[in-house]
Image (cartoon, grey):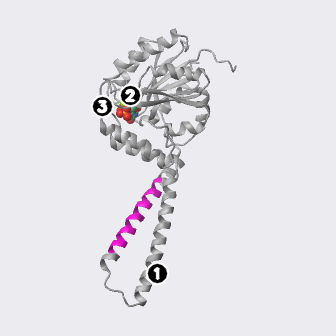
Amino acid sequence: MSKIKQVPVLYIVIPCYNEEEVLPVTSGVFLKKVRDLVSSKKISDDSRILFVNDGSRDATWKIITELADQDGHFLGISQSRNRGHQNAVLAGLMEAKDQCDITISIDCDGQDDINAMDKMVDEYLSGCEIVYGVRSKRDKDTIFKRATAESFYKVMNFMGAEVVFNHADYRLVSSRVLQEFQNFKEVNIFLRGMMPLVGFRSTSVYYERAERIAGESHYPLRKMLALACDGITSLSIKPIRMITSLGLLVAVLSFIGIIWAVAGNLTGATVSGWASIICIVCFVGGIQLLCIGVIGEYIGKIYMETKARPRYIISERTYEKEGRQ
Ligand code: UDP
Ligand code: MG
């Protein structure tokens, strides 16, 4: 492989889950973007738009196969069942890594400004291997979504899981980085936290986040909390350290309590202390359960990791894999 960068082949990786309302609109936008980038000689005409159907229950896969029939720039793979956004993106990236020079992962709902791709490719051409798309504003999100999403990043960072603030999964990653990334074998994946761990030169480009074109968000608060919890426990052991500190604090307090109780007993000042005992028992009991829960989360993760189940299973493709290069 020569070091001189030729016009790169770009694969745009797009996870889709029940997006029949959105795809017919956004697919045209993606195609236009690829054509524009090709005509401005930033990317090769071998570039492709790779849809990853994440076990949709609606007509998403049918739409993808039709698109692939209509235009050779569209490709599609289908996961054998719904595995979630992260696994869908990973499946697409792993599928693309040997066929291209760069990948850009983006949601299919038109929320992430597609024009930021130009800047991303420029950054790649000037030597960056990872380019994070960062939301500069979230004016179009509801106040609730904005507040919860932004606290998500703050809590994550506080808990020791380093993530780029306001960066979701809109990102350019070179195939070189992906070749290294495939050695990250963990089953619990949190791409936006794992990519920085690979290293290489990286930068950010900023864009404004728009409203969803149609359909509903698949990330309600419940899923966002689960993602945060997953991200934190996958990337950091700070919660366990916090338990240790808490244990130390409670131990010190208990020690003071013991001295106080013994001194009280010796001076004969012990009176009926029902309320205080109940409070202490409940408090310590609660903390203990909480701590066991956190430790349990990690044990659960270890359990899942030891099974080493496949992270994605591709059941269908709109093309023959062997026939391609
Ligand atoms: N998605 C997916 N699998 C899922 C949930 C979502 O592939 O189980 C895709 C979805 O089609 C979209 C992207 O992930 O392209 C982001 O989802 P969504 O727009 O619902 O999340 P939000 O932007 O509201 O955080
Ligand atoms: Mg969205």
Give how far across and how far down residue 188 sits, in percent.
49, 43
Question: SS for tag 3?
Answer: loop
Asked if one can make out residue 259 in the rendered structure from this viewpoint, the answer is yes
Q: Residue furthest right?
A: 2
How many labels were placed on the picture?
A: 3
Q: Nearer the viewer, residue 295 or 63?
A: 295
Look at the image and say whether residue 303 sits in the magenta stretch. Answer: no
Q: Please give the residue where the numbered disc 3 appears in the rendered image.
A: 216
Q: Nearer the viewer, residue 172 or 189?
A: 172
User: Counting other residues with Cα less than 10 Å from the Cα at mark 2, is it few (<14), some (14-19), or many (20 or more)?
Assistant: some
* Vertical arrangement, residue 215 with respect to residue 305, above or below: above
Give how far across and how far down residue 132 sits, in percent.
51, 30
Residue 259: assigned label = 1
State the extent of the magenta-drawn residues as a range.
Answer: 278-297
Q: Is residue 210 left or right of residue 96?
A: left
Give how far across and how far down residue 26 sits, in percent.
37, 19
**Image point 44% across, 34% down: which residue?**
168
Respond yes or no on whether mark 3 lies under 8 Å from ligand 1.
yes
Question: SS for tag 1?
Answer: helix
